[in-house]
Amino acid sequence: KYYALRHNYIKSVRDADPIVMIPKGSNSVERFKTYLMSINPEMASTLAMMPTPSVSKGRSGVFYQWDLYLLRRPGALWPTLGLGYPGYQLFLKHFDKAPTVEGVSSIKRAVEDVVAESRAPASRIILLWSRRKEDVSEEVYDLITTQNVVLSHRGSSFVCGLELVIENEDGTYEFIPFV
């Protein structure tokens, strides 16, 4: 039964054809922003107005710069009572070289700090990298696939994993893990 279920999941991912072509744009961030707008029409108008890069403040008082940052503020009752719309946040940071363990860890800490300040859960944490010839290390791969940012607020918990999006030279995106 387990193997049949596992096979169905693997088959469904393969059938979904996760090969995604990179859209046109002046740089990696603009291309990925165009991709996000194409897959989520509700977010398109908001993303079109978002300045890049953006700055957000963490609970520690530190300001963090993101290549793309989107915040949907929580509803009026969420901060005090934990009721209603919790809001969401999208974080994107571009890497010129293959991400390192230190770089990924610092992004995770920055997101945790911003989430603690805004009390809106992280919905997507994207590390964008334009691959040339190098590859990510096993340590970075393990960190990306095992680490999460958790927001616990008034009895609710929201978990968001890190996602590495790679711009390949063949004109396709590679998602680790595929969301």
Image (tube, rainbow, N blue to C red):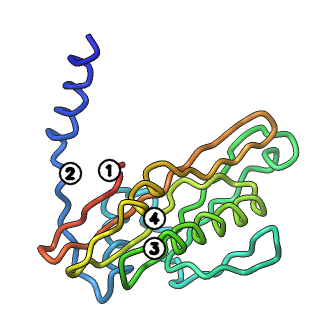
Q: Nearer the viewer, residue 93 or 51?
A: 93
* Real-space CA distance between mark 1 and mark 2, rounded to the nearest whole angstrom: 8 Å
Q: How many numbered discs, if any?
A: 4
Instruction: Decide if residue 162 is on the left or right side of residue 82.
Output: left
The residue that label 4 is drawn on is: 126
Residue 109: horizontal and vertical position, in percent?
65, 65
What's the amino acid at mark 2?
Answer: Pro
Residue drawn at (48%, 75%) of the image: 93
Q: Earlier in the sequence, mark 1 or mark 2?
A: 2
Residues packed near mark 2 inside 10 Å, few (<14), some (14 to 19) or many (20 plus)? some
Q: Earlier in the sequence, mark 3 or mark 2?
A: 2
The residue that label 2 is drawn on is: 18
Residue 123: horizontal and vertical position, in percent?
54, 53
Residue drawn at (68%, 76%) of the image: 56
What's the amino acid at mark 1?
Answer: Phe
Compared to residue 82, the image places residue 108 above or below, namely: below
Residues packed near mark 3 inside 10 Å, few (<14), some (14 to 19) or many (20 plus)? some
